[in-house]
């Protein structure tokens, strides 16, 4: 099993994070939840240029598989490099989302992990699990695909990651289901640091997580609170106002 502190962004970025007091683990070795602001667009080259004036990027490419639950938007569960990575939304404040990493573990997965950490956080009761451990192919083929309320989405990513003061930021190009998008995100355990940097970058618009953007692109239903918010393929909600925006923005 990989130690939990690798959750943040992977081995290529750990050195920066551990050198920054506001981003490292607490005194008990637990990962502190991070506040995040993320935007999407067809082209975010202008924001990328601003990021590169502030820091040199680390470039990584990956193939990832997201597990999209029809019952919640508050769980980001994905598989990358034969590791399952799960984080959950625990708070929303000042237009930011606070995400808590809860699991990062390599395959094969033990039955107890699937039953107590994966399915419950996707808002689902665990199925009957006949094996004590599951390989990646068994987990996807026998467990996940048997659950109609989970959509398996393959995503290709090229990420450019930046360490800027107390924040981690990224510009990424993604492709899924033949669709291409770009995204920029800023995160930190300090919400004021996130707000300061997104103002500096002149970022505006709706704060939209990976899960909600994938659902929007694929025409799936986005879940808000106890209800379900239907969106069309262009992201326009039917009835309810869209997500909170950065304070002071109109875009």
Image (cartoon, rainbow, N blue to C red):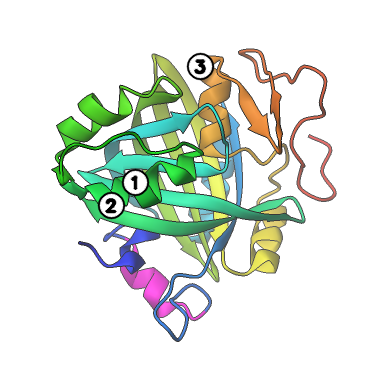
Q: Nearer the viewer, residue 124 or 183?
A: 124
Q: Nearer the viewer, residue 128 or 179?
A: 128
108 vs 180, left or right, is: left
Q: Which residues are magenta?
A: 13-21
Measuring 51% from the left and 54% from the top, which residue is drawn there? Answer: 169
Foreground mark, 3 or 2, reads: 2
Q: CA distance from mark 3 to mark 1?
A: 27 Å
Q: Give yes or no for residue 20 being in the magenta stretch.
A: yes
Query: Marks 1 and 2: CB-CB under 8 Å?
Result: yes
Q: Give yes or no for residue 176 being in the magenta stretch.
A: no
- Residue 195 figure quarter: bottom right
- Residue 136 figure quarter: top left
Q: Which mark is residue 235?
A: none
- According to the image, label 1 marks what residue? 115
Q: Which mark is residue 218?
A: 3
Crowding at dot 2, Cα within 10 Å, few <14 / some 14-19 / many 20+, comes out as few
Going from N to C along the chain, the mark reached first, 3 or 1, is 1
246 vs 156, left or right, is: right
């Amino acid at each position: 099993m990989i130690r939990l502190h690798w959750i943040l962004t992977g081995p290529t970025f750990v050195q920066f994070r551990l050198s920054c007091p506001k981003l490292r683990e607490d005194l008990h070795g637990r990962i502190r939840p991070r506040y995040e602001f993320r935007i999407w667009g067809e082209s975010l080259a202008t924001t990328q240029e601003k990021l590169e004036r502030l820091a040199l990027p680390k470039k990584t490419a990956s193939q990832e598989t997201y597990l999209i639950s029809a019952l919640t938007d508050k769980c980001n569960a994905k598989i990358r490099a034969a590791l399952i990575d799960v984080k959950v939304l625990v708070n929303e404040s000042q237009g930011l989302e606070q995400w808590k990493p809860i699991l990062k573990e390599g395959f094969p997965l033990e039955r107890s992990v699937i039953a107590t950490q994966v399915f419950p956080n996707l808002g689902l009761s665990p199925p009957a699990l006949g094996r004590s451990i599951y390989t990646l192919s068994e987990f996807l083929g026998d467990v996940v695909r048997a659950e109609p309320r989970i959509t398996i989405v393959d995503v290709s990513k090229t990420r450019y990651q930046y360490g800027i003061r107390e924040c981690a930021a990224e510009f990424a190009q993604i492709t899924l289901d033949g669709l291409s998008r770009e995204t920029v995100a800023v995160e930190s355990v300090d919400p004021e640091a996130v707000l300061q940097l997104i103002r500096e970058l002149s970022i505006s618009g709706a704060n939209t997580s990976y899960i909600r953007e994938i659902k929007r692109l694929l025409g799936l239903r986005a879940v808000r609170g106890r209800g379900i918010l239907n969106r069309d393929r262009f992201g326009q909600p039917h009835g309810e106002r869209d997500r909170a925006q950065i304070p002071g923005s109109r875009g």
